[in-house]
Amino acid sequence: MNKKIVGVTGGIGSGKTFVCRILEAMGYPVFYSDRVAKQILITKKSVKEKIISVFGALAYLETGELNKPYLSKQIFSNKKLLEQMNSIVHPIVKKEFEQWICQQNASIIFYESAILFESNSYKNFDKIILITASKQTKIKRLLKRDNSTIEAIEKRMNNQWADEKKIPLADYIIVNDENSMILEQVNEVLKNLLLIVNHKKNTAR
C-alpha cells in the first residue's frame, strides 16, 4: 500500500498531542516520537550509558527514571548539549518508526514531533500539519501541566522556532486556542489528505 506519511508538529504547549489523540480516535495511527524517545532513554542500556557520559550520573534518578529537572536545565541552557542529546536519541527513534510503519495498514499515518522543522526532518514527510497557539496560551497550558516557571518555559520555547518561521513551511495549519473549533479544522485537513490519496489511487490504475 502506498501510505501517506504526515508529520504533526508544533511548539511546546501548542496542543499537538491533543490533535493527535483526535486523529487516533478517528482511526488513524499516530507515532508519538517524543514518547518513544523518552522510553528509549530509560530502557536502552547503550543509550543510558551515552547519556551518562555526556550529562553525568545525575541524569538519572536512583529509580532509573530520568532526572527531568536536571536534564532540562542542562539542555535548554546549552544548545550543544541539546544537539548531543538529539544525536544520541533521534537515530534510534527513526529506526523504531521505520519498523512501526511496516505494521500499519492505514493509507494515512501520522508522526508527532515537536521539532520537525528545527531538525530539518520535515522534508522526509509527504505533508506537514502545524499546530499553533499564542505564546500566552502555551505558557498558560504549560504552567498548569508541568508545574514549571515562566522563566523555565521561555527557555524551552527559545530553543524552538517561532510559529511565524514555521508557517510558510507547513502544508496545513491548525489553530489550537480557546476560540477555534479544533474538530472542524482536523476534518478539513483529513478531507484534503483523503482527496490526495484517492487521486493517487485513481491515477495509478
Image (cartoon, rainbow, N blue to C red):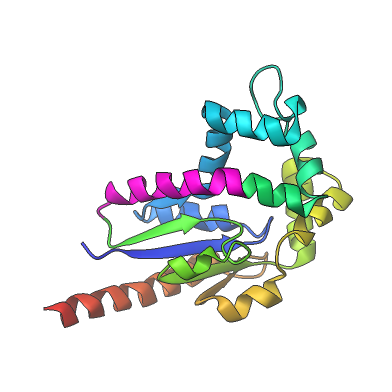
Q: In the image, residue 108 lies at what x, y percent?
A: 33, 63
Q: Residue at x 31, y 72 (%)?
A: 194
Report if residue 174 lies within the magenta region: no
Task: Residue at 69% x, 32% y: name it.
Answer: 53
Is residue 95 one of those drawn in magenta?
yes
Quadrant where the C terminus sits is bottom left
Looking at the rendering, which quadrant does residue 110 occupy? bottom left
Residue 159 picture location, percent across and down: 75, 59
From this viewpoint, which residue is outermost toward the left? 205
Give the total of numbered labels.
0
Instruction: Residue at 67% x, 61% y: name it.
Output: 11
Task: Pick out the residue farthest to the right.
Answer: 151
**Up-down relation of residue 101 to residue 63 (above or below):** below
Looking at the picture, how far across and down is residue 25, in whole percent? 40, 52
Image quarter where the N terminus lies is bottom left
State the extent of the magenta-drawn residues as a range. 87-105
What is the chief secondary structure element of the magenta stretch? helix
Q: Is residue 205 above or below residue 82?
A: below
The residue sitting at the top extreme is 62
Along the viewing direction, whichever of 182 and 115 lies nearer the viewer: 115
Q: Position of residue 68 (x, y in %)?
A: 73, 35
Left or right, residue 52 beside residue 42: right
Q: Is residue 91 left or right of residue 2?
A: right
Q: Which residue is painted at 37% across and 52% down in the image?
A: 29
